[in-house]
Amino acid sequence: MKLKSFLKKAAFYLLLNMPILAFAQAKSIQDPQHLHELQQKFVDLRFGMFIHYNIPTYANADWPDPNASPNLFNPKHLDADQWAKAAKSANMSYGCLTTKHHSGFCIWDTKSTDYNVMKSPYGKDVVKQFTDAFRANGLKVMLYYSILDTHHKLRPNQITPKHIEMVKTQITELLTNYGKIEALIIDGWDAPWSRISYDDIPFEDIYRLIKTLQPDCLVMDLNGAKYPAEGLYYTDIKTYEMGAGQRMSKESKVMPSLACLPINTSWFWKTDFPTVPVRKPQEIVDKLIKPLNEASCNFIMNVAPNRDGRINENAIAALKEVGKLWKNEGPNTPLPTLDMPIISSNKAIDRPSNSSWSDDMNIMDFANDDDYKTSWISNATVSEPWYEVELKNEQAVNMIVVEEEKPNIESYVLEYWNGTGWTTIFDGKNEERVKVHRLPRFWTSKVRIRIKHAKGVASIAEFQVFDERR
């Protein structure tokens, strides 16, 4: 009877407090100061270990056959404690493990698919071993997760509602069963080699799911190449895969960032790793950790375990030497408080657009083509240029972003069509390269900008329209 009474009271308490809990979760998603604190803590970590270890380890390829048998995954001496101690020897602050890479094999005890480590000869949860070992060694824990999944055919033109549910289920497992996760590094979204858009797998849904499960978990999408350095598009932290040629702009030192490179010649272990030289410790310190940290950028270096589940001795020795040459000296330069990341779908992409006289071929269509390297450019003789996007029917809007190739436009007016005339929603100055306007929600079929003053010829790389959930 006492148990029943307790359960009734507990259920009543939860029911009574559900609105409060939901409000608290929503507040954490929308609170710039809370995000700022998390971003600063991440930058202060300075240096960590990426661990690419998954079924590609056993295929001598970063992208193996998507139908490779789980029987391949059979380490004889997997030792996550060795990984953690190697990270500690280099004075790293955290580790991040590839829970699922692009070929779809899950190295945790998932209920979402049979293509997982529990169906392999090894039969043990690698994610749990990793999280337990790194925490036991005083290191923080992050996880990597690929949206692209070639085994389950989660790829362009084949995505179904079941795929979206699989992603949500897998992320829920990872953020429910393994304790506090400092960050989830996501790969395979909006990349030229994956071509999965933020609408195909709805980014805002996934972002909010993550923040509901773990409000302090940073969301990082490896998309640094496409978006302007000064704006947080679809990520809490700017990310740069340096091996793919992605580099942080020297002018963007105020942005919390992550850069990654392997200590070896590629991400996953290859048969020649024991004999091929790794990166030189002095270069790791002087050319990567120090200059990146000075630019508010956290450096994560990949160290790939071999087929036995252990890190090779040449990498172990290099990490120890790094630890002799470098240590974390504590908090980095304070970051400014930034705009919240843009996480919603852009309604303006490829919609009909119009403008005042353009410069030759740089016509209006280039300002809403989702390409940040092209721009609509006004004809130099136009004294007060304007640019307009027509939406599909009347729609709700509460955010407009104007992005330029470089800061140029200084003062302007934003307006929306109310059915009979134009209503002004902003009239003032904003000299940032990425001009973010979060506004009270309104309904309209057209939005436009009238440019009052620019330093040179007015141009717009992307004119964006959103209706974000609040």
Image: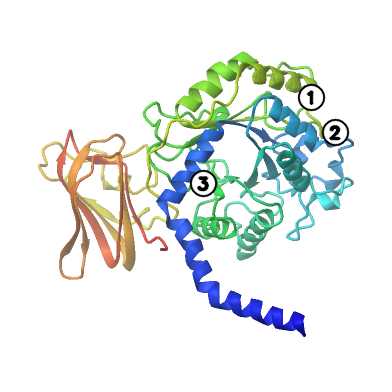
Q: What's the amino acid at mark 2?
A: Asp
Question: Mark 2 vs mark 3: which is more N-terminal?
Answer: 3
The residue most toward the bottom is: 1
Say which of 200 and 117 sits in front.
117
Q: Residues within 10 Å of mark 1 (few under 14, many from 20)?
A: some
Residue 179 horizontal/vertical position (percent): 68, 52
> Which mark's residue is nearer the viewer, 2 or 3?
2
Quarter of the picture holding the N terminus: bottom right
Q: How many marks?
A: 3
Q: In the figure, 285 relative to 235: above or below?
A: above
Quarter of the picture holding the C terminus: bottom left
- Residue at the location (16% across, 63% down)? 422
Q: What's the amino acid at mark 3?
A: Asp
Q: Which mark is residue 308?
A: 2
- Is residue 221 found left or right of 357 in the rendered image? right
Say which of 154 and 80 sits in front.
80
- Is residue 314 found left or right of 459 in the rendered image? right
Q: Which residue is mark 1?
A: 312
The alpha-carbon separation of the residues under discs 2 and 3 comes to 34 Å
> Which mark's residue is nearer the viewer, 1 or 3?
1
The alpha-carbon separation of the residues under discs 1 and 2 comes to 10 Å
Q: Which mark is residue 190?
A: 3
Residue 341 visible in the displayed image: no
